Image (cartoon, rainbow, N blue to C red):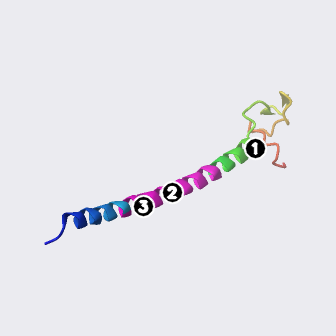
Amino acid sequence: MRRKGQSIVEYLLIFAGIIAAILVVKETIESNLKGSYNQLSNEMSSAINYIDFGATGGSSSGGHQNGGNGGDGGGSVYHPHVRR
């Protein structure tokens, strides 16, 4: 016949193992999410540097609008880092 104390210790060890596994998975997921967030943030920052948001830009008539670069005939957004 098994002792009651031995049974409790076994359950506590199983419970501790489950908690440890949960913590490991949590840390792994958290690390991956932080890496993904940082990568996304960097890519968005880079993209924002190329976007003019319409404050300046070309007009389809070819004239200068708000200090823009003049038109390319398509009314496209001005990208200061793109050579034309």
* Residue under label 1: 50
Residue 81, above or below 57:
below
Q: Amino acid at mark 2?
A: Glu
* Residue under label 3: 20
Q: Amino acid at mark 1?
A: Tyr
Residue 27 is tagged as: 2
The location of residue 38, given as percent across then percent down, is 64, 51
Q: Which quadrant holds residue 59?
A: top right
**Region of the chain picked out in magenta, as a range:** 17-39
**N-terminal-most mark, 3 or 1:** 3
Single out the mark in the foreground, 3 or 1.
3
Residue occupying the point 64% across, 53% down: 39
**N-terminal-most mark, 2 or 1:** 2
Residue occupying the point 81% across, 48% down: 82
Name the secondary structure under disc 2.
Answer: helix
Is residue 25 shown in magenta? yes
